[in-house]
Amino acid sequence: MGINGTRNQEEQRREENGVVYFDRGIIEGADGKKYARFAIQTHFVEVGESQSALVEKYVRPLYQPGDVLSFGAKVMCMCVKTVRTRDEVKPGFWANLLWRFAGINSTGVGMHEPYKLQLVIDMVGLPRVLLGAFLSAITRPFGVRGLFYKVCGKGVGGIDGFYYRSSFERYHTLALINPDNGTELCEQLAEETGIPVVLMDANDIQRDQLGKSSNMPLTDAQLQDAMRDNPSGQGAELTPLILIRPLG
């Protein structure tokens, strides 16, 4: 993070009722509706922690009626234990060969890691990975991107971790796989807390909505508008919980 980024973070920092959060400002959606967004700082969430306990500890002190919560997919993976450790993944011949040819996207994350590629092989099978790698290789010179993930499917694009550049050493040896029952998890969390929830896998490029609770008052388009600039941020901020406050 540069000097300007550090200064902006310091200017945004707030503390209320014992909770540290960052005021990400007001954003206007395509329909003219405006939203205030508060990125709530948590501790580093470990495997098996309770998602509802996190909401009660960090969100409840700031919550106002009408607010909705964007819950970060990475933290949800830790809570529901959709994770794999390096010890559980054994890179074989194809993983050790193909990772050298894998692309890397603008966020610095890709399949250029044998453990991560082997995890994909374990999830979807070698034939699909080979097909995805082949089609990606022959279309990449023509500017086609992301074909490998489309061919492999099954949430492969949502795999995170096994990433030696991560700010958190824990993610050097741990991979997170987005849960495939996102709507069910949001419904359960909303029932336990009374707060409308959307499960979001967000970064600076895209915001993948993995599910939302039935009491969510915002449409999918409005949620995308509210999260358009990725208020959860990147790096070591530890702000996976975004309280969205519709205005007016």
Image (tube, grey):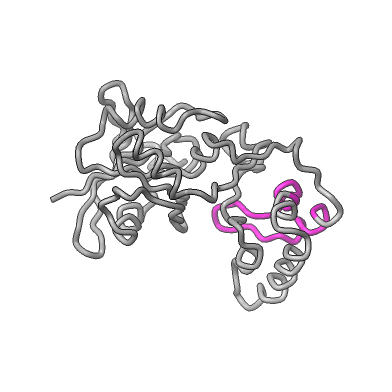
Residue 117 x %, y % = 72, 53
Q: Is residue 90 magenta?
A: no
Residue 100 x %, y % = 77, 57
- Identify the residue shown where x is 19% and y is 62%: 32
Asked whether, in this view, residue 169 is left or right of residue 212, the answer is: right
Q: Is residue 101 magenta?
A: yes
Q: What's the magenta region? A: 95-118
Most distant residue in the bottom direction: 142
Tell me the quarter of the picture where residue 99 sits.
bottom right
Tell me the quarter of the picture where residue 209 sits.
bottom left
- Identify the residue shown where x is 20% and y is 54%: 34
Q: Nearer the viewer, residue 127 or 110?
A: 127
- Identify the residue shown where x is 45% and y is 51%: 202
Q: Nearer the viewer, residue 59 or 8?
A: 59
- Identify the residue shown where x is 23% and y is 44%: 245
Asked whether, in this view, residue 199 is left or right of residue 136, the answer is: left
Tell me the quarter of the picture where residue 141 sits.
bottom right
231 lies above or below 75:
below
Residue 38 x %, y % = 30, 39
